[in-house]
Image: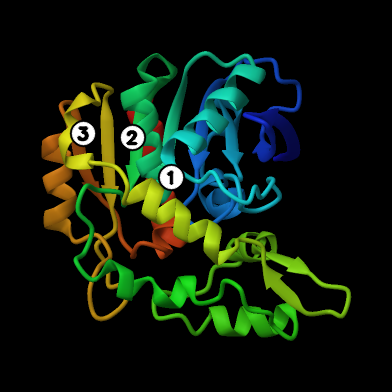
Amino acid sequence: MQSKFISSNGIQLHFLDSDSSNSNQLEPILFIHGLTANSHAFDAIFQNFLAEKYRFISVDLRGRGLSDQPSTGYTMLDHAKDIVGMLDNLDITSIHIVGHSFGGFLGLYLAIYYPAMVKKLVLLDAAVNMHPNTKEMLVPALGRLGKTFDSFDDYINKVKQAPYLSFWDEAMLSYYKADVFQNADGTVTPRSKPEHMMEAVLKGSLGMPWGEIIGLCKQETILINAPGIYNLGAALLPEELAKETANLLSNAKYEQVSGNHQTMLYGESAKQIAALIQSFIK
């Protein structure tokens, strides 16, 4: 995967691209990460694909990773315009989209409002209704933002204590390295800023009437759910709520993999997801 930058919607976006030639000869798939994540969130899934058949594009959304961090502008429309501009500048007119969590909501938004651009849609643990205690369950993940850690090792040690990390996969390391900025004194600070992520939640994922508009998504869709315990003894997206959203979509099917909302991107779950995606987009 090559690290690249591109101008879109007035900002610079960073993305990973498996195609060094930009030839568009391979079937393109756009991967969109979760709320505070970055483009390396899918590294373990990429390792389990038949790379010679597909072009993987994994973007750092605005305010995350190495992409620009404008002071405001984190609505779903802002994010969507970033993606549309990026794809336009890459001369890609239509693409499969794989979105995890917040990225799934953005993929759904793009499928509804820019339907010609989206071929097939893969939702990873994204649904109209998540667990009713989602805000409380996300506290450990969001709590790292705005803090400075003594070193990267200190940061990783604290990450490994999170309730949702039931195992450690070495593929996680690239994701967490991309998550922080290395300060001159050796300390590290998460790149995503709390105020930006709060705006993305309030004016983005929570600011949309998903229940009212979800039926407008006509693309063939697969919702992949990992109902393992995430925090507070429950799944972030319980099976019944995931199936509820799959039923609301006009052309969708439900699949389940092992793990939870975070660990579904790694280990055995990553293999399962890669297989499901490849079968789905044939």
> In the image as oriented, which residue stretches furthest toward the right?
184
Q: Does dot 2 land on a helix, a strand or a loop? A: helix
Distance of mark 1 from mark 3, alpha carbons? 15 Å
Classify 227 as above or below 121.
below
Please state if 53 lies on the left or on the right of 99 as rendered. Answer: right
Using the rendered image of the protein, determine whether residue 79 is visible from the camera's viewpoint: yes
Which quadrant holds the N terminus? top right
Q: Say which mark, if any, is on residue 214.
A: 3
Q: Report crowding for label 3: few under 14, some 14 to 19, many 20 or more residues within 10 A (C-alpha).
A: many
Pointer 3 with pointer 2, Cβ within 8 A: yes
**Residue type of the residue flagged with mark 2:** Leu
Task: Report the number of numbered marks.
Answer: 3
Q: Say which mark, if any, is on residue 103.
A: 1
Distance of mark 3 from mark 2, alpha carbons? 8 Å
Distance of mark 2 from mark 1, alpha carbons? 9 Å
Image quadrant assignment for residue 219 = top left
